[in-house]
Image: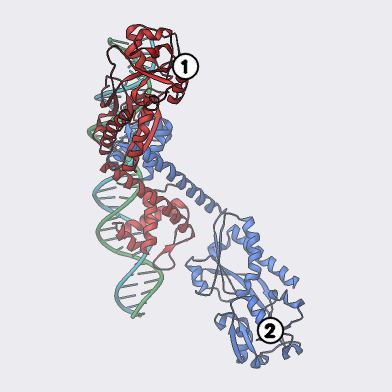
Chain colours: A red, B blue, C cyan, D green
Amino acid sequence: MYVELRHLRTIRAIQQAGGLARAAEVLNMTQSALSHQVKGLEEQAGMELFVRRSKPMRLSAAGHRMLRAAERILPEIDAMEEEFRALRAGRTGRLHIAIECHACFDWLFPVLEMFRHAWPEIDVDIRAGLAFEALPALNREDVDLVISSDREPPPGIVFNPLFDYHPTFVASSANPLAAKDFITADDFRDQVLITYPVSRDKLDVFTEILTPAKVEPRAQRTAELTAVILMLVGSNRGVAVLPDWVMREVKSNADYVTRPMGPAPVLKRMYAATRVEDAGKPYMAHFLRLARSEPVKLQRGA
Amino acid sequence: MYVELRHLRTIRAIQQAGGLARAAEVLNMTQSALSHQVKGLEEQAGMELFVRRSKPMRLSAAGHRMLRAAERILPEIDAMEEEFRALRAGRTGRLHIAIECHACFDWLFPVLEMFRHAWPEIDVDIRAGLAFEALPALNREDVDLVISSDREPPPGIVFNPLFDYHPTFVASSANPLAAKDFITADDFRDQVLITYPVSRDKLDVFTEILTPAKVEPRAQRTAELTAVILMLVGSNRGVAVLPDWVMREVKSNADYVTRPMGPAPVLKRMYAATRVEDAGKPYMAHFLRLARSEPVKLQRGA
DNA sequence: GACGTACATGAATAGACCTCATGATAAACG
DNA sequence: CGTTTATCATGAGGTCTATTCATGTACGTC
């Protein structure tokens, strides 16, 4: 039995128009065409869908069943088509975000909250970029935006700069390093370094400091959540290097000390990677604007 | 934008099979055909539904939306087609009943209750045949069965005999007619006759007794519910003629007397009218069987 | 009973959809 | 890194289905 949407539209039209001839006008076809179509449909169904004893022909019991299906299905189709019109008009879309930088949750949540209000139709989602490579996922359209501090954009991808930040050293005030004004690579030799559980080439403390200086910390342990890292640091189980914006609450806490990396200050830039064809979309532009301005407010508040 | 079910099936198949070529096999068509179809669909949608950068091609964001629609709509279609298979196999159907005879509720409800258990898939409904002519409604397929005691089946309609019954006189025991052994037409001249609110040609007391004898009761008043008629009779506000099966409870009640019509006993036959093409259907046959056997049990219980 | 309206039917046609053959490009392999 | 294989795209041509046109038939109506 091969039912097609055309058939459902026909059933509905005949019911609404109250007759085959009138329905044909509504559907912009000849009465003959509809008659043939109904005949074919009834052959498919294996039974009469209409009662022809009375003259404006009416739905039979079986016909009413099909009408019920039509009235459930056709609005779904219409809704989908409306969604696609909105998609074409750029009023809606998808924004699935992958973050390679764990500390970014801190500013991403407030930003997304603001975005959600401005673009309620956009399908928003976040995926922590632990289990997969984020940039290929961008190309496969598994995600639409990647928060990253990589430097070399692959073809088809643009790196939109968001803001600059300082990778900042944090330790317990009981740690001997609290006595220093700034921290260098050598200072890590005797320390337990606490990081997110990702590869070293995605951790600022390695890419910017330890790896160039060929220094290995005494030990390294990992924690997924920023709050857990800070807790471990607070109880002097290790030290960490985190972006400055997460230091906001810690700075006013006597248990912690924060120090710049040195002697020259280390500055990194945060990027939002998108596909080139998405970069121009209005909602994407709005998100990038928010992601540029909001995090710096957090940094200032620190 | 002309979406068809074929397109939704394609979207789903490509997703499930993980690629266009494999999907083509599942759908029993060539890879080329599917490629053309997808191209056409994307033209209709006005955007790319698939990402072709990676080789087994994958759904894009827009494609995922269409997939969602497909996964909601296609099961509905499958369910409908399954319903039609059941309809063809006679396992399901519709049984909308019109009753011209009000007292028939008494035995119809128990019968329908039994039927509902045996044929849970059948769409059962009752419509009191007050506002419309029941037999034309049968022809128009507004209803599928009419409980009636008419005699002349119109073309295309069969009258299936159910059972015989005696129109029986009932009055208050305080009524003078309680002294008689049987009741004749003349006895109504001084009585208020209580009937259902339908035309006289559908009331046994008129068609069988009063109209042939050209007798008019002193007055006539109506009530919709059998219980109300009996209540009025009980308080000696009038007399009534009702089928014997509704006398069940009244017979053992000292407030009432029931008497046969006379002098010759009046016998009427109850019919279930159906369309000829329905008469052979298994569920219809089962209903008729129930409607033949169950009411007589009620009569015996009286 | 004649007329108008509503649906059915048959033949012809236009157009959509499919297949075949082949080209292009990305993944896999040695 | 080149070769092979798998996957998808494209163009031309054939087929088949849906539609139209012209006409027939039956019901409802006056």
Residue A236 badge: 1
Chain letter, disc 1 residue: A
**Residues marked 2 and 1, same chain:** no
Percent x, y for residue A248?
37, 27
Nearest the eye: B54 or C4:
B54
Residue B235 badge: 2
Percent x, y for residue A39?
40, 56
Identify the residue shown where x is 75% and y is 77%: B251
**Which label sits in the foreground, 2 or 1?**
1
**Circle 2 — which element?**
loop
Identify the residue shown where x is 42% and y is 31%: B17
**One can see residue B265 in this view:** yes
Q: Is residue A194 rendered to the left or right of residue A160?
A: right
In the rendered image, the vertical position of residue B284 relative to residue B205, given as above or below: above
In the rendered image, the vertical position of residue A47 relative to residue B198, given as above or below: above
Quarter holding residue A34: bottom left
Quarter holding residue C4: bottom left
Quarter holding residue A286: top left
Crowd class of label 1 (few under 14; some 14 to 19; many from 20; radius 10 Å): some
Q: Is residue B67 rendered to the left or right of residue B278?
A: left
Q: Amino acid at mark 1?
A: Asn
Q: Are marks 2 and 1 in contact (CB under 8 Å)?
A: no
